[in-house]
Image: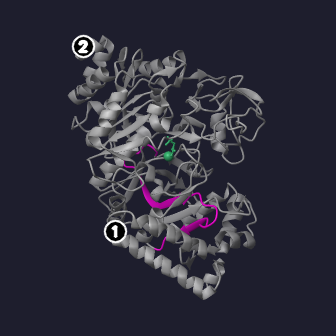
Amino acid sequence: MSLEKILDKKSLDTLKEINNKNVEKVIEQFVSLCKPEKVTVLSDNKEDVEYIRNKSIENKEETKLALEGHTVHFDGPKDQARDKANTKILLPKGTEISKKINTVAREEGLKEVLDIMNGCMKGKELFVRFFCLGPLDSKFSIAALQLTDSTYVCHSEDILYRQGFSQFKKLKDPKNFFYFVHSAGEMEGSVTKNVDKRRIYVDLQENRVLTVNNQYAGNSVGLKKLALRLAIKKASQENWLTEHMFVMGIHPKGKDRVTYFTGAFPSACGKTSTAMMSGQTIIGDDIAYIRINEAGIAHAVNIEQGIFGIIRDVNKKNDPIIQKVLTTPREIIFSNVLIKDGKPFWLGMGTETPKDGVNFLGEWTEGKKGKDRKEIPLAHKNARYTIRISDLENADPHADDPKGVPVSGFIYGGRNSDTSVPVAESLSWAHGVFLGVILESETTAATLGAEGKLVHNPMANIDFLTVPLSTYINSHLRFGDHLDKPIKIFSTNYFLKEDGKYLNGMLDKKIWALWMEGRVHGNYAAIETPIGLIPKYEDLEALFKENNEEDYSKQAYNKQFSVRLDKYLDKMNRIEKIFKEEKDIPQVFWDHFEQQKKRLQEARKEHGKPVVQPEEFEK
Ligand code: SPV
Ligand code: MN
């Protein structure tokens, strides 16, 4: 099939400007497989971006809302979250990454997905787009080519990613790009019909992901979680890190400094709201590339320029900055919210919500029940907004710096109701890596399947690993060895409960952030416990007073920071079982495992009780 036959003159001219035979080959191959009715190649210019926005309204993938620039998109009823079961890594036959990662023999998997993709774009228009992961013209930049029949995917990417047409034009190695082929598949109205044939297949050998019969961004938008998977492999081979991490600047009051942190949290565990806290600055909320420069200092960039954030519980009190953005005119795509009179509504928005409207299941009225006889909430728990970071008043001035920002701290956060303290510092880099690797978290609505189940999620990255767990752990250990300016590693947990009630308020996370920042600069002492270093009451009391105007009681502190020795020991047993099933886990991991277990057992013996208060460790 020749491109001259498929493309009109404008598309052909645009493609010729790129002048890359590899790109042309990809287009030819997938046009002849997917059989779209029309193919449009788009550049970065205003007119092309506008073309997508208009198309998305015309073809009803999005609907305009009352405020200027606001639109809504609905994913289908069964397409509201990442589909882990149908996401697979294509690997040479007989190889494995981890017991927890879905893989399929490459030949077999390719045949399966290519068969499903055969003719999947019949009657549709295929869009070809060029983007860049990371800032342009930087050692972090990775060129990314997107082929999709969804205008929603294209429009989302316009908001979320840096335009990369110019990046493609100057590629030194014309093969050096990732590519993503997506099709929403056959449609019934605006809903994907064959969700049972949804496949998201990651082909490491070709640096590409093929994804079909889905619309939810976590499955469809190539540059997000699909590129994350490819980049983890690339980083592992090239000795840098690709992490499921935010990047933010922490600004302590009265001190003329900013300290940059990156943080990994499983989906829907407070990652975005941490990165967006008032008084601090945000660079990114989801995915970071981190490299060590010539001076031995780690620098991080956000690979995105926007946020695909969970809208549930965004309200004036807890997230004033994002609440303001979502209620004023600008380019925003809302997804899977409730719409009434052209206005979006969501769960936990803190204002009155209507008794009826339209949501992802169609017409909704209060009290309406689903097939399971349970009441249907007004909006999906995983409903989202898509915005640009530059629209936030606390966007960091270095968000697009090609050098990235220097990183002083890593945070690993989980959702845990009965074990982990709100914040702790690791005893060393390797102990910090250990804490990240043993992260457990309760499942949420961000992935399909049961919620509230405690699962092991190393570095909050288990859903995206494309290298063996042992390789991934070794990459982190090695990374620490190459740092001349050390990075401190912390763990956090915002979700500790007692008698079913959270022990912490939503705004407490700012205090933990400021404490971690102060630790980097040697401002606070800490108490050494079997699980790491925890804050002293006096320091937190002062931080609460100064920053949240809150009287923090010793009683609250004791509850939150007591070390639940028996619970931690249970965790160690769970972790041991999991890692015994994994291959080639480095000895350093087991050393830290044994040391931590021993510390916990000794404390249990010494104190003779299952829960020990912080000051008892000071004696
Ligand atoms: C997450 O689930 O971690 C997200 C949203 O950031 S998704 O695009 O679904 O990955
Ligand atoms: Mn994420």
Q: Quadrant of residue 6?
A: top left
- Residue 546 locus on image (x, y percent): 69, 62
Numbered label tally: 2
Residue drawn at 42 percent across, 69 percent down: 429
Amino acid type assigned to the residue bearing label 2 in the image: Glu
Amino acid type assigned to the residue bearing label 1 in the image: Pro
- Residue 130 locus on image (x, y percent): 35, 30
SS at circle 2 = helix
Q: Quadrant of residue 68?
A: top right
Q: Is residue 415 magenta?
A: yes
Lower position in the chain sequence, tag 2 or tag 1: 2
| Whether residue 556 is visible | yes
Q: Which numbered dot is residue 150?
A: none
From the viewer's perspective, is 539 left or right of 122? right
Residue drawn at 55 percent across, 19 percent down: 189
SS at circle 1 = loop
The magenta segment is 399-427
Q: Which numbered dot is residue 4?
A: 2
| Whether residue 129 is visible | no
Of residues 472 and 377, which is closer to you in this image?
377
- Residue 541 locus on image (x, y percent): 69, 69
Q: Local crowd at mark 2 within 10 Å, few (<14), some, or many (≥20)?
A: few
Q: Quadrant of the N terminus?
A: top left
Residue drawn at 32 percent across, 59 percent down: 471
Whether 136 is drawn above or below 562: the answer is above
From the viewer's perspective, is 237 left or right of 253? left
Q: Is residue 407 magenta?
A: yes
Q: Local crowd at mark 1 within 10 Å, few (<14), some, or many (≥20)?
A: some
Q: Which numbered dot is residue 586?
A: 1
